[in-house]
Amino acid sequence: MTDSVRQLSALMRKEFLLEWRQRYALNGMLLYIVGAVFVCYLSFNARRGQLTPIVWNTLFWIILLFTAINAIAKSFVQERAGRQLYYYILASPEQIIISKILYNTALMLVLALLGFGVYAFVLGNPVQDVTLYLLTLILGAIGFAASLTLVSGIASKAENPATLMAVLSFPIILPLLLMLLKISKNALDGLDRGSSWDEIGIVLAIDAIVITLSWLLFPFLWRS
């Protein structure tokens, strides 16, 4: 157990070090968020009355979704065959996929919270239940990270990974995104939190199912 934790920590440390050495990728994602928010500000600044809370919420999740795809798509696609063989010798496939999911979750949490702060500062904050909205961001970050990491691992084995990832991620992300939109809409309107428990339970179930499938299926994918 101790060796497994040590190897998992080493794999996560490797992910953070690689991201820090390739800071242009992180800077590009931050620039994407800021640029998208600025475009929304320019588009709706002239007619502020048209930016209703529903439009505000929908635009934010669209920005967050494309940020997640750009951030997580490179999880396995950028890995070279020699490096993958080196990982295959050192660690188990379960540890590799869990370390990727944990790292991408941490990355998505930073991007989601930072994006929400910039978005609310520039376009205003109509959210009445901020705590529930932040909980939705956390659940969304976990769901996006787990789903897109697994899809990235599958797409990396194909000849055209970018196209395959777009096709495979849609049916997984769509139900998750619909539940997140509904919970965030309840938080936006300040409804009683009890009205969101069913949707929160569904999102937690989706996250748990995707993580479990990653744990069970990735070893077969990794050995191929």
Image (cartoon, grey):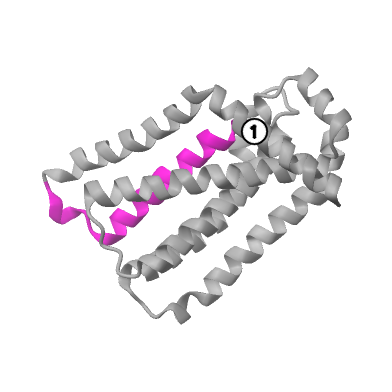
Q: Residues within 10 Å of mark 1 (few under 14, many from 20)?
A: some
Does any portion of residue 107 appear in the rendered image? yes
Q: Please say whether residue 95 is one of the residues in the magenta stretch.
A: no
Q: Residue at x 14, y 51 (%)?
A: 48
Location of residue 41 with respect to 49 vertically, above or below: above
Looking at the picture, how far across and down is residue 19, in whole percent?
57, 29
Q: Is residue 169 left or right of residue 213?
A: left
Question: Considering the image in quadrants, where does the C terminus appear?
Answer: top right
Residue 147 visible? The answer is no
Q: Residue at x 88, y 33 (%)?
A: 223
Residue 206 screen position, x and y as percent: 64, 60
Q: How many marks?
A: 1
Q: State yes or no: residue 49 in magenta.
A: yes
Secondary structure under tag 1 reads helix
**Magenta part, dominant SS:** helix
Q: Position of residue 141 (x, y in %)?
A: 53, 51
The vertical placement of 60 against 139, above or below, is above
Q: Is residue 85 left or right of residue 51?
A: right
Is 58 located above or below residue 86 in the figure? below
Residue toward you, 12 or 155:
12
Query: Which region is colored magenta?
Result: 47-75
Give the x, y percent position of residue 188.
Answer: 33, 66
Label 1 sits on what residue type? Glu
**Residue at image mark 1:** 15
Q: Which residue sits furthest left?
A: 46
Q: From the viewer's side, name the closer residue of 38 and 95.
A: 95
